[in-house]
Image (spheres, grey):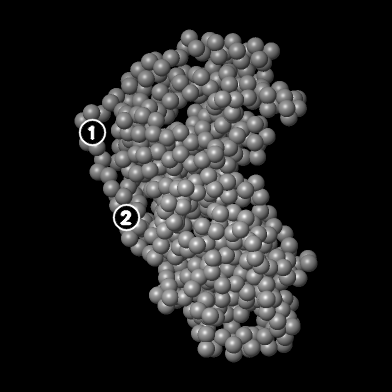
């Protein structure tokens, strides 16, 4: 029954949504502000925002677009040049499917009674079926909002299947509404791996007017490597926000300090609309010298729908921290050379 | 080994009762090469007298900043040269090692993080990749830089990022963090700092470590073209 219902809902949805309809709605809700001057942009005066999204079901396409527009409009009004949403933000658009409640109940039953392989199969089928319309709604909404508000948006993303590979994909929109970067999640969660989600193979940052931006996730935070690579690739900003699998952590401060990146960690809140309840605040971190704080918190974790901060990356780049600025290329080369590197000998007394 | 009691004490101060491993905490940058042998002899006597494993002060040997671990018999069972240096030491043209080399001890596999190496995530990660389950660190921090986040930063980062036990003396403070990220003792300017942990436990996520290595390898051309821009900053 679930499969039939899913196909029927997706078919019905194809009549309810199309690219032009979504864009027109976004234009109505967020008219293009041609009068708005382009914000002054320099690494010394970067103003950024991290959204704490509330995951919920949507009643209509308008409801969805209005809900996404609200934080973007507030960030733009606050003078921010970049606003970041948490990963998988697009997936809640699935609730726009006609008959979603019945579909959700079917899926929940299947989840409880089915085996691991049944779940993985159902999950892949769900993603394959809805990615078309969810992607259409999500991409067109954020493209139009970025263009209307003339703001760069790290919009989160959705599960997508491409060439038989299921990935958790994030999108970055430039302030002209173009897709500036697409990034497959580098460190899928254990649950995602069990559902067949493949890891992204490389970092693909996007060029924007505020510099290069890398789209990472909270699951990257315990690992210095992606931030290190992002920094070497010339990024000035990275996004690593909360997901339904867990919050971002205090490690954001450490990663920002050691990589020299401004690190946006959007938050996430759910009141159980999709069965789970969680509450992960947003935060913004940057190298100590780029903030007014002593610990690298540009905006400490706070229970607010939108967190903004101004960071001075120029100041951070011009200062050397006595205790963390040294770089040893020889160690680094040996490290990425692999087996013959750092672990080959022992430091015993001999 | 079940539980290991670690204490961070001022140099040559008697260890608290029950301490099995002692790290000296000192306000000096390092012990000069001319004094190193005398310092090590005094440290060996301390280890024998109190029957403890001992990480004495950082010292200069052959123009390297070094750290070592002494057994309760006063024998050096492991040593490490600094891989990175405090910028004020770079001015003196000291050399840097290019590898972190954990070694086996009765306490488990130990890596010594010399001075600012505790702040370098690639060093802690490489140590854990090479099997270390206990990271011991001794760092110099200028008195005017001695604040809580500065002391906690490196040790907590190393422990939480790698699921490894860390005991770190920093300036005149110290911190001991268990492999699950729990801060067992410190930050405190009131020495000794003391806590017990199981040094053989390690919560390292080997899949994530392998993924990190693959990512570095995949971006090797990008990184190799810019060897001096590691971490986005110039090699100074």
B235 relative to A78 in the view: left or right: right
| Chain identifier of the residue bearing label 2 in the image | A
Question: What residue does disc 2 label?
Answer: A314
Q: Quadrant for the N terminus of chain B, please.
A: bottom right
Residue A335 position in % (x across, y down): 56, 57
User: Where B213 falls versus B11 (above or below)?
Assistant: above
User: Where A301 falls versus A138 (above or below)?
Assistant: below
Q: Residues within 10 Å of mark 2 (few under 14, many from 20)?
A: some
Query: Foreground residue, B160 or B93?
Result: B93
Residue A240 position in % (x across, y down): 49, 44
Q: Nearer the viewer, mark 2 or mark 1?
A: 2
User: Where A151 falls versus B158 (above or below)?
Assistant: above
Residue A114 position in % (x across, y down): 75, 25
Residue B16 in which image quadrant: bottom right
Give the residue displayed 30% in from the left and 33% down from the top.
A150
Give the residue displayed 42% in from the left and 58% down from the top.
B228
Residue A257 position in % (x across, y down): 45, 57
The mark that comes first in sequence, 2 or 1, is 1
Q: CA distance from mark 2 to mark 1?
A: 26 Å
Query: Foreground residue, A342 or B105?
Result: A342
Give the residue displayed 42% in from the left and 78% down from the top.
B92
Give the residue displayed 37% in from the left and 56% down from the top.
A291
Query: Foreground residue, B176 or B73?
Result: B73
Question: What residue does disc 1 label?
Answer: A36
């Amino acid at each position: 029954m679930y499969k039939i219902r899913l196909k029927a809902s997706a078919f019905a949805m194809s009549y309810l949504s199309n690219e032009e309809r979504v864009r027109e709605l976004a234009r109505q809700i967020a008219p293009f502000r041609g009068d708005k001057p382009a914000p002054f942009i320099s690494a010394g005066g970067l103003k950024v925002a991290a959204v704490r999204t509330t995951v919920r079901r949507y009643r209509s396409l308008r409801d969805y677009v209005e809900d996404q527009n609200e934080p973007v409009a507030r960030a733009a009004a606050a003078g921010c040049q970049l606003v970041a949403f948490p990963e998988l933000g697009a997936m809640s658009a699935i609730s726009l499917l006609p008959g979603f409640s019945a579909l959700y109940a079917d899926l929940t039953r299947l989840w409880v009674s089915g085996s691991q392989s049944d779940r993985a199969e159902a999950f892949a089928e769900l993603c394959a079926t809805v990615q078309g319309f969810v992607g259409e709604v999500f991409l067109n909404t954020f493209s139009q909002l970025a263009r209307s508000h003339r703001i760069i948006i790290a919009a989160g993303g959705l599960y997508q299947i491409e060439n038989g590979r299921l990935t958790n994909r994030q999108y970055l929109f430039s302030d002209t509404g173009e897709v500036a970067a697409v990034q497959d999640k580098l460190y899928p969660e254990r649950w995602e791996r069990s559902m067949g989600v493949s890891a992204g193979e490389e970092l693909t940052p996007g060029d924007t007017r505020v510099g290069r931006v890398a789209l990472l996730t909270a699951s990257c935070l315990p690992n210095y490597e992606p931030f290190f690579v992002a920094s070497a690739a010339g990024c000035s900003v990275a996004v690593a926000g909360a997901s339904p699998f867990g919050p971002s952590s205090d490690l954001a401060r450490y990663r920002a300090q050691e990589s020299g990146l401004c690190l946006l960690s959007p938050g996430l809140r759910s009141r159980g609309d999709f069965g789970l309840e969680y509450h992960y605040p947003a935060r913004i971190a940057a190298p100590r010298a780029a903030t007014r704080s002593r610990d690298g918190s540009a905006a400490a974790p706070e229970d607010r729908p939108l967190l903004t901060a101004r960071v001075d990356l120029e100041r951070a780049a011009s200062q050397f921290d006595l205790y963390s600025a040294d770089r040893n290329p020889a160690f680094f080369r040996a490290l990425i050379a692999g087996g013959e590197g750092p672990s080959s000998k022992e430091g015993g007394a001999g | 080994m079940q539980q290991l009691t670690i204490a961070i004490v001022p140099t040559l101060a008697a260890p608290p009762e029950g301490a099995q491993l002692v790290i000296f905490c000192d306000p000096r940058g390092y012990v000069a090469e001319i004094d190193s042998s005398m310092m090590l002899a005094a440290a060996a006597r301390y280890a024998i007298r109190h029957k403890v494993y001992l990480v004495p002060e950082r010292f200069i040997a052959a123009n390297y900043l070094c750290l070592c671990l002494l057994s309760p018999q006063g024998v050096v069972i492991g040593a490490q040269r600094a891989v990175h240096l405090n910028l004020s030491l770079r001015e003196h043209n000291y050399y840097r090692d290019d590898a972190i080399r954990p070694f086996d001890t009765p306490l488990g596999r130990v890596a010594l993080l010399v001075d600012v190496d505790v702040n370098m995530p690639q060093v802690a990660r490489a140590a854990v990749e090479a099997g270390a389950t206990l990271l011991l660190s001794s760092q110099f921090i200028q008195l005017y830089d001695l604040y809580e986040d500065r002391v906690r930063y490196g040790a907590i980062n190393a422990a939480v990022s790698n699921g490894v036990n860390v005991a770190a003396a920093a300036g005149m403070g110290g911190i001991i963090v268990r492999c699950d990220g729990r801060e067992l003792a410190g930050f405190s300017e009131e020495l000794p700092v003391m806590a017990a942990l199981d040094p053989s436990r390690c919560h390292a996520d080997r899949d994530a470590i392998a993924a990190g290595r693959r990512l570095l390898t995949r971006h090797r051309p990008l990184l190799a073209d810019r060897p001096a821009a590691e971490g986005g900053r110039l090699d100074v």
